[in-house]
Image (cartoon, grey):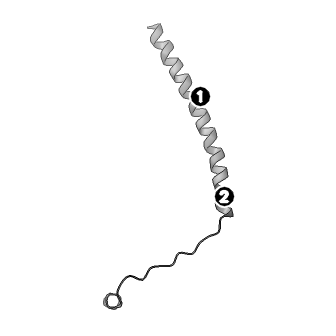
Amino acid sequence: MTTFFTILFIILGVNLVMMFFNLSGTNQKAKKSSSSVSDATISKIHPIDLISSKYKKAV
């Protein structure tokens, strides 16, 4: 029984450490991506006219 709890607490400890590093890395990535998005130029999207003119008149 003590072996089970020892292994369980070791696994939980490793999980806690990995979660801490994962969440701290997420904050750094979010800061980097938001600054790179603001520096990027905004491209304009133009609609493609594939519908025939007869269909447009009917609707």
Could you tell me which residue is drawn at 48 percent across and 18 percent down?
8
Q: Position of residue 23 (x, y in %)?
A: 60, 39
Q: Does 6 sit left or right of 51 as displayed?
A: right
Name the spot of residue 22 as percent of width and height, x first: 58, 37
Residue 25: % across, % down: 63, 41
Dividing the picture into quadrants, the one containing residue 14 is: top right
Which residue in the protein does label 1 denote? 17
* Mark identifier at residue 59: none
Residue placed under numbered mark 2 in the picture: 36
Given the current orientation, which residue lies at the most extreme top position? 2
Residue placed most toward the observer, 48 or 14: 48
The residue positioned 53% from the left and 75% from the top of the image is: 45
Looking at the picture, which amino acid does disc 2 mark? Answer: Ser
* Residue 2 on image: x %, y %: 47, 8
Please, is residue 3 above or below residue 20 in the view? above
User: Left or right of 12: which side holds 34?
Assistant: right
Residue occupying the point 34% across, 87% down: 52
Quarter holding the N terminus? top left
Image quarter in which the C terminus is found: bottom left
Which mark's residue is nearer the viewer, 2 or 1?
2
As helix, strand or loop, the secondary structure at mark 2 comes to helix
Q: Is residue 58 above or below residue 25?
A: below
- Compared with 40, 4 (above or below) is above
- The correct choice, above or below, for 37 with respect to 17 in the image is below
> How far, Cα to Cα, is label 2 from label 1?
29 Å
Give the amino acid type for the residue marked by disc 1 in the picture. Answer: Val
| Residue located 65% across and 69% down the image | 41
Element assignment for label 1: helix
Crowding at dot 2, Cα within 10 Å, few <14 / some 14-19 / many 20+, comes out as few
